Image (spheres, rainbow, N blue to C red):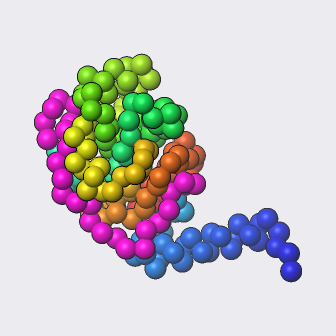
Amino acid sequence: MRLSRRQALQGAAAVVAASAVSAGLPAHAAAPPRGLRLLESQDPMPDVAFKKGDGQLTGFVEYQGAPVVALFWATWCTVCYDEMPKLDALQAKLGSRAHIVPLSIDQAGMPAVKAYYRRRDLKVLKPYLDDERIFASIMGIRGVPTGFVLDRQGNMIAASEGPVDWDSPTALQYLTSL
């Protein structure tokens, strides 16, 4: 029996919904965008400090109460070159409903990150830095971009390695449904 495209998509949506429920996600959570996979276990994000643009230390505890996208990236990453403007636009649409925390692993430090933000005309995203790559090492980051979606309690519920369709309507729907 051959399935129509519509039947296949409906079946895939049912599998995603069942996965979301079995993973402990709210039943009303929308499907994640392409490139983002749901995690079976919902472990808390490690409580590791990283630097804000002003050099002060922060951590993900500061963002509990809203969904978070934590993205490890670098100024030399060609995939990140396309991802960062999409994330900037997504953060503009999200406002305070969710936070995007792009953690640069650049060893050149915050001056390199801020120069990149100016060159790419990133206006909404705030710069963050893991220049010693301590956090990236704890998280087992193998390459960039690598991302994690955290629920309102700070648990990792989805992950990505490589590009994600952050500019799709699905991304906005997914994050606002959490």
Residue 47 position within the rendered picture, expressed as x and y whole percent measured from the top left? 18, 57
Q: Residue at x 33, y 20 (%)?
A: 115
**Stretch of the chain drawn in magenta:** 33-57
Q: Position of residue 52 (x, y in %)?
A: 21, 36
Point out the residue furthest to the left here: 56
Q: Quadrant of residue 95?
A: top left
- Looking at the image, residue 134 sits to the left or right of residue 28; the answer is left
Q: Residue at x 47, y 77 (%)?
A: 21
Q: Position of residue 91 (x, y in %)?
A: 40, 40
The residue at the point 45 percent across, 35 percent down is: 77
* Residue 38 located within the stretch drawn in magenta: yes
Q: Residue at x 46, y 79 (%)?
A: 22
Question: Along the horizontal axis of the image, is 84 left or right of 137?
Answer: right
Which secondary structure type mostly characterizes the magenta part of the structure?
A: loop
Residue 56 occupies which quadrant of the picture? top left
Q: Say which quadrant the C terminus sits in.
A: bottom left
Q: Is residue 86 visible?
A: no
The answer to whether 26 is drawn above or below residue 97 in the figure is below
Query: In the image, is residue 41 above or below residue 150?
Result: below
Does residue 156 appear anywhere in the picture? yes
